[in-house]
């Protein structure tokens, strides 16, 4: 997790630095409904590379926004989900969805 000194002073800039990429927002959108396995996420996010997904998941986990649960089975089973901090982003994602719907209907 980043320390306070590593984050921008502006709270909006802090949020953007944590979740501001296209792929992170779409990953969070999916995880707001349920836990997902890596391959499920990759298939649901058209155009994302394995490297970008892996990097995004690691950064979100490092920042305390998502968790990674390894079930230690054979074959390996790993799931990703939202932490309590991540769940607090659900309202923001909902507002973004509302704006997207409004914008599409307005143009």
Image (cartoon, helix red, strand yellow):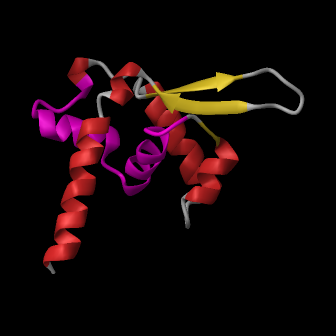
Which percent across, then down, holds residue 85?
34, 23
Is 37 left or right of 33, judged from the image as shown?
A: right
Residue at figure coordinates x 43%, y 52% from the top left? 26
Q: Main secondary structure of the magenta part?
A: helix
Is 63 left or right of 102, judged from the image as shown?
A: right
Q: Residue 98 versus residue 53: which sits nearer the camera?
A: 98
Quarter occupied by residue 11: top left
Residue 91's place in the image compared with 3, above or below, is: below
Residue 32's place in the image compared with 73, above or below, is: below
Quarter occupied by residue 78: top right
Residue 76's place in the image compared with 16, above or below, is: above
Question: What segment carries the magenta color?
Answer: 6-34
Residue closest to the far left: 10
Which percent across, then down, holds residue 52?
54, 52
Which percent across, then down, holds residue 107?
15, 81
Residue at figure coordinates x 24%, y 41% from the top left? 92
Q: Residue 92 versus residue 18: which sits nearer the camera?
A: 92
| Quadrant (top left, top right, bottom left, bottom right) of the N terminus | top left
Residue at figure coordinates x 43%, y 38% from the top left? 32
Please count the marks in the image: 0
Is 35 left or right of 92, judged from the image as shown?
A: right
Residue closest to the far right: 74
Is 24 left or right of 91, judged from the image as shown?
A: right
Residue 33's place in the image compared with 39, above or below, is: above
Residue at figure coordinates x 37%, y 49% from the top left? 25
Q: Residue 100 versus residue 72: which sits nearer the camera?
A: 100
Reply yes or no: does residue 28 show up in magenta.
Answer: yes
Reply yes or no: does residue 82 show up in magenta.
Answer: no
Which percent across, then down, holds residue 46?
55, 65
């Amino acid at each position: 997790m980043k320390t306070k000194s590593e984050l921008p002073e502006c709270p909006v800039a802090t949020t953007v630095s944590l979740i501001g990429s296209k792929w992170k927002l779409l990953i969070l959108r999916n995880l707001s409904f349920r836990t997902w396995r890596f391959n499920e996420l990759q298939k649901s996010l058209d155009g994302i590379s394995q490297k970008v997904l892996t990097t995004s998941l690691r950064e979100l986990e490092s920042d305390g926004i998502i968790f990674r649960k390894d079930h230690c089975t054979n074959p390996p089973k790993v799931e990703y989900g939202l932490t309590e901090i991540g769940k607090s982003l659900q309202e923001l994602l909902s507002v973004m969805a509302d704006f997207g719907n409004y914008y599409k209907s307005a143009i």
